Amino acid sequence: MSPVRASPSLPAMLPTIALVGNPNTGKTTLFNRLTGSRQRVGNYPGVTVARRSGQMWLESRKAEALDLPGAYSLAAGSPDERIACDVLTGRAGAAPELVVCTVDANHLQRGLFLACQVADFGAPMVIVVNFMDEAESKGVSIDCETLSMRLGVPVVPISARYGHGLLELDATLKKSLTAPPRMALPAWDPEVGRSTGRIAGRIPEGRTFSAPELRRMLFDNDSSLLDLSGIARGERAAVLAAARSELSAAHPLAYESTAHHAFLHSALEGVVTRGRPPKPELTRAMDRILTHRILGLAIFIGLMFFVFQSIYTLATPAMSMIEALAGWLSDLAGRHLDGLPLFRSLICDGIIAGVGGVVVFLPQIFLLFFFISLLEGTGYMARAAFLMDRLFGWCGLNGKSFVPLLSSYACAVPGLYATRTIEDPKARLLTILIAPLMSCSARLPVYLLMIGAFVAPAYGAGVAAGTLLAFHLLGLVVALPVAWVTNRWLLKIPAQPFVLEMPPYRTPGWRDTLWRTWLGGRDFLQRAGGIILALSILIWALLSFPRASSGEAPPDPTAQVENSYLGQAGRALQPIFAPAGFDWKLTLGVLASFPAREVIVSTLGIIYRLEGNPEDDPEPLIEALRNAKWTAGPRTGQPVFTIATAFSLMVFFALCMQCASTLVVISREAGVRYAVITFVYMTTLAWLSAVVTYQTLSRVLP
């Protein structure tokens, strides 16, 4: 169901509706339904790590929707949970006019606990009970009308995945913006007022906090509000201890939980009825296999092999079509620009060869995002996180680092933001330091180019797929000992428990899966049409100038490239990369790819196009690489690219810094010092590994 669209005149300030809820309650799916946005959807914690906004229509009225990070409570223990708390308290701007609290029909009381905390701030609220289709399939019935009457706020049953109940929700939201409903919570005992009074008495003059904000300070050990209170960090423990001494409970930190759950127990009495008991035998049997420490890991590797085998084989026809289209465009442009050789070279050798050489890998990008989205949608990725917890434990991390690392396989930027779900600051920093080692989608074109040119022809498609999988796992394999060394000698993170709710196995939401696939491919195309296009033009210019003066005979194409600005720079820096088997052209590709790693493909495409005879049909890039020869030094006349060179290049790209954007985000999330440290250690590690790989394979392989 899509919200009704209209085009009335709109007020300057739109009412704000904030979506909150526990992780894995379908909150982002609901947000996508309401706004038409296509945010990433996954059924494990950590998918939404910052507030996202989108506009929605409620009949003829427009509103702004905020998708806040998932949280089990407002006791903010991680940066992403603090975002939710700050928005709801109005400390991150104006407080929302309405809060939509999404709860799982299968875990009603747990989701309503968060609703009680939100309601304690006096926020107008609508409660959405999601996954009603699953509850009904298990014989569970929920009397939402009775629950609404007892809580004093609307309770709307829906299935966000299928769009059921959204018309009723739209009408409820529109009505609630006009007449804001507030939950009928019981009053707090006077002792809570005495406790918060003690905290208020220690807050410096000029700073004011509401009673709900003071209660958050009382009930939370590390509330973000304490950072704003002005109470010195060294005094906070004593202030909170004195305040909690007013509470009669044996365990003061459990005071809030006891009060809210007592209220919910009464409110839910008779609301939930079960017709027949659920049958979890199949789920348990599958989990015994998929989470087994040996068999489960073998299945995970097997699934990944299947994914990369499919990426390598299924995309071949589409890649051939894109190559043919690029060749046709180049021929067409060349025929119309024969009288303008320099402009012809810019269009054909610079733009079409540069951008086309990267776009040809679009089918593999689509397939990669499709399979990852499919696995997330089934609930398998939560099991993979459980497996990774066992793998990560020895190096100081736990399964919570799996989500950021998994996200980094698409791009390190969202992966780095996903570290905000990690409560321990040292564990978060360690995850930030190793996240760029994961092989992002920008590295995929490099792997595919080398594997397609040298591995597949020599060893076949099966070995090619295994090689592609191996290089995607290489970053993770290297990251673990790096994490162990860093933790052992520097950070010394204590052992951390990992608690993860296993979601039920679900049929993937094909709508969200296909949209996630499209967004992954679209982002790749946007890079091709933006930064890669700009860099392709810049690289072409630096390879095409300086030109011979009007009185001189034009140099042959190879001499022109070698004597260009970029050619001179490449030959000057080539000795650094010579031990890794790189000639000056490959060295140029490595250096030019720092803004975006896939640019190496366009750089090599431009170099070999410019070196070719313009009267002849240009060689495809793969053929040009196979035929490339050393033009100087002791290896003159020998092939530049061998199996050893191909593996050396792939190793370098697997371990070097992902891109300039990654460094910028690291500096924002961890500080400039750690951005510099990450760049230096990854570049050194990549260079050393590439040298060892080339020197070893060049002696072992013919």
Image (spheres, helix red, strand yellow):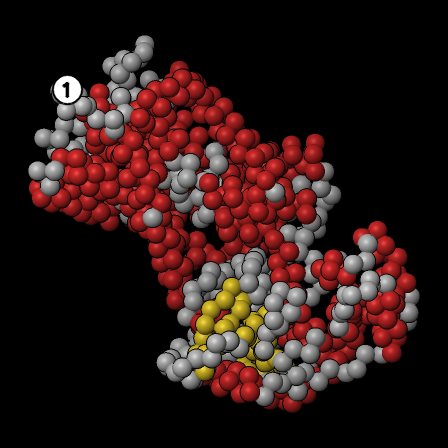
| Residue 587, placed above or below residue 378 | above
For the question of whether residue 367 can be seen, the reply is no
* Mark 1 Cα shell of 10 Å, populated few (<14), some (14-19), many (≥20): few
Residue labelled with disc 1? 552
Count of number-bearing discs: 1
Q: Is residue 8 left or right of residue 675?
A: left
Q: Position of residue 495 (x, y in %)?
A: 72, 44
Q: Name the residue at 11% across, 41% down.
A: 337
Return the x and y of residue 501 as percentages of the image width and height.
Answer: 62, 61
Amino acid identity at mark 1: Glu
Secondary element at image label 1:
loop
Q: Nearer the viewer, residue 450 or 189?
A: 189
Q: Position of residue 559 (x, y in %)?
A: 22, 20
Residue at 26% x, 34% y is 540
User: In the picture, residue 302 is in which quadrant?
Assistant: top left
What is the quadrant of residue 243 in the picture?
Answer: bottom right
**Quarter of the figure with the N terminus:** bottom left
